[in-house]
Amino acid sequence: MRLHASGIESTAAVAAAQLGADAVWLSKLPATPLCRRVVSELRGAGVEPEIAWADHGRQGLRFSDPAKPPREGQTVHHRQDVAAATATPGEFPIQAVREPPVVFTALSTAVLSEQLTETTQALLRASADAVTAVALDFTPELAAPETYCERLEAVADQTELLFLTESGARAILDTSAGGRELANTVAAEYDLDGVVVTRPDHSAVALQTTPGTTVVHERDTIETNLVDPAGADGAFVGAFLRSLVEGEDTAAALTAAVAAAVLARTIAGPLLSTDPAELDRIADRIA
């Protein structure tokens, strides 16, 4: 059995840190040996955890059995009574969201409770001049599509950049659109500055809007031998946001994101281990 820290926010933070960014991960955790192990693993990967320690509740868990054909893999989520669901804005230092140039969260966190949705809204509002990014990472074991849609509507006013998959959009937003059409539709519906869509074949589309202008970029992926897909979504987001922090444009950020996801699928476990030089070599084959 292998144990890893996981979740798209933490894996995105690790990817950004591996590529040279200063990354902080906020969470509320019970003060248990398991949670201290999570904090230690993330810190070892270059992330600075900022934790509100609780004397109650559980740590969210995901159990995965990555079987090979003809067996089917299984994933079981256990997030009942997690401490994070009770988090309030006052439990986190305000500078943790006011100072960074980017603040990122995921709807799989917001769906855990109404309290956590309100906390997510408050922290995004408090982020001042930061780019606020949210992932619509649909996980049917956690909540119904309707709940995800409600949470998206709740945080949309505080969101500038949305990451989503075509499959997740079809489940939550009741649309058959894909790629460019999906990006345009979602950007208009929720008044977003940017939308990034990943397709089932791991290619991706990024839309950026400015007053009077909409620009869409597309990138194909490259073939690789799959080892583990667990960290690909987080690596994609982390590399994209790190590129924005470095002042790169949307096209370059999308290239870096696709390259990081390629690397992540070749690594066992959800945490990306790489460096900018390795990423650049893969990116050169994608751009």
Image (cartoon, rainbow, N blue to C red):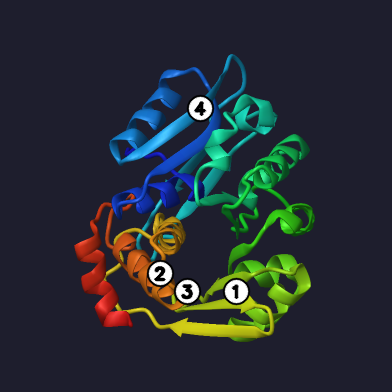
**69 to 42, vertically: above or below:** below
Give the SS element for disc 4: strand
Q: Which quadrant, please, contains the N terminus?
A: top left
Badge 2 density bin: few <14, some 14–19, many ≥20, Cα 10 Å: some
Residues at discs 3 and 2 in contact (Cβ within 8 Å): no
Q: Earlier in the sequence, mark 1 or mark 3?
A: 1
Q: CA distance from mark 4 to mark 1?
A: 33 Å
The quarter of the picture where residue 180 lies is bottom right
Give the SS element for disc 3: helix
Q: Earlier in the sequence, mark 4 or mark 3?
A: 4
Foreground residue among 237 and 224: 237
Q: Could you tell me how many numbered marks the image carries?
A: 4
Q: Which mark is residue 259?
A: none
Nearest-to-viewer mark from 1 and 3: 3
Nearest-to-viewer mark from 2 and 4: 2
For label 2, the residue is 248
For label 1, the residue is 166
Residue 13 pos. (x, y %): 42, 47
Nearest-to-viewer mark from 4 and 3: 3
Residues at discs 4 and 1 in contact (Cβ within 8 Å): no
The quarter of the picture where residue 232 lies is bottom left
Residue lying at 27% horizontally and 62% vertically, measured from the top left: 266
Residue 88 pos. (x, y %): 69, 29
Q: Which mark is residue 51?
A: 4
Q: Is residue 104 left or right of residue 150?
A: left
For label 3, the residue is 250
Residue type for callout 3 = Thr
Q: Is residue 236 left or right of residue 110?
A: left
Residue type for callout 4 = Ile
